[in-house]
Image: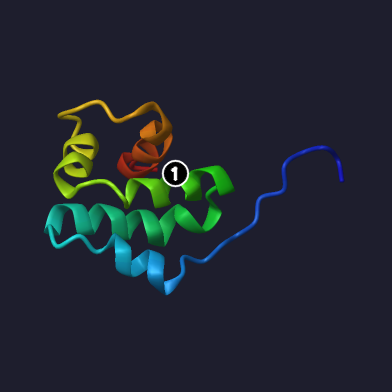
């Protein structure tokens, strides 16, 4: 080991994917894109933040990803990852 953090690819479980389906088209599209492109390479901390995000009410999540409200500090990085165009 050279001291750098090892990045591990983790496929989202069926439960994570199911919980990501919120029933609002805009939100579903954003969360699905995140799962397909970013979740697999996310750090353990980011995956934990994503799990915490999924416990929040849909209107709050939508307002955070649309920039209408400021998310709690512990969710800020995962919200940025979800809304990133990279």
* For residue 56, side relative to residue 50 (left or right): left
Which residue is at the far right?
Answer: 1
Measured from the top left, where is residue 1 in percent x and y? 87, 46
Q: Residue at x 49, y 48 (%)?
A: 48
Secondary element at tag 1: helix
Q: Quadrant of residue 37?
A: bottom left
Q: Residue at x 39, y 70 (%)?
A: 15
Rendered view: 78 above or below 14: above
- Colour scheme in use: rainbow
Rendered view: 42 above or below 9: above
Q: Residue at x 13, y 59 (%)?
A: 25
* For residue 82, side relative to residue 26 (left or right): right
How many marks can you see?
A: 1
Measured from the top left, where is residue 81 in percent x and y? 39, 41
Measured from the top left, where is residue 72 in percent x and y? 33, 29
Question: Badge 1: how crowded within 10 Å, few (<14), some, or many (20+)?
Answer: some
Q: Quadrant of residue 79?
A: top left
| Residue holding disc 1 | 49
Measured from the top left, where is residue 86 in percent x and y? 40, 43
Q: Residue at x 38, y 36 (%)?
A: 75
Compare residues 31 and 50 and report the one nearer the observer: 50
**Residue 48 appears in the figure:** yes
* For residue 46, side relative to residue 69 (left or right): right
**Residue 43 appears in the figure:** no
């Amino acid at each position: 080991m050279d001291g750098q953090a090892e990045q591990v690819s983790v496929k989202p479980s069926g439960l994570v994917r199911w919980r990501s389906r919120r029933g609002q088209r805009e939100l579903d599209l954003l969360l699905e894109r995140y799962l397909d492109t970013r979740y697999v390479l996310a750090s353990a901390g980011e995956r934990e933040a994503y799990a915490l995000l999924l416990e929040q009410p849909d209107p709050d999540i939508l307002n955070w990803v649309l920039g209408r409200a400021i998310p709690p500090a512990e969710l800020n990085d995962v919200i940025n990852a979800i809304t990133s165009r990279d």
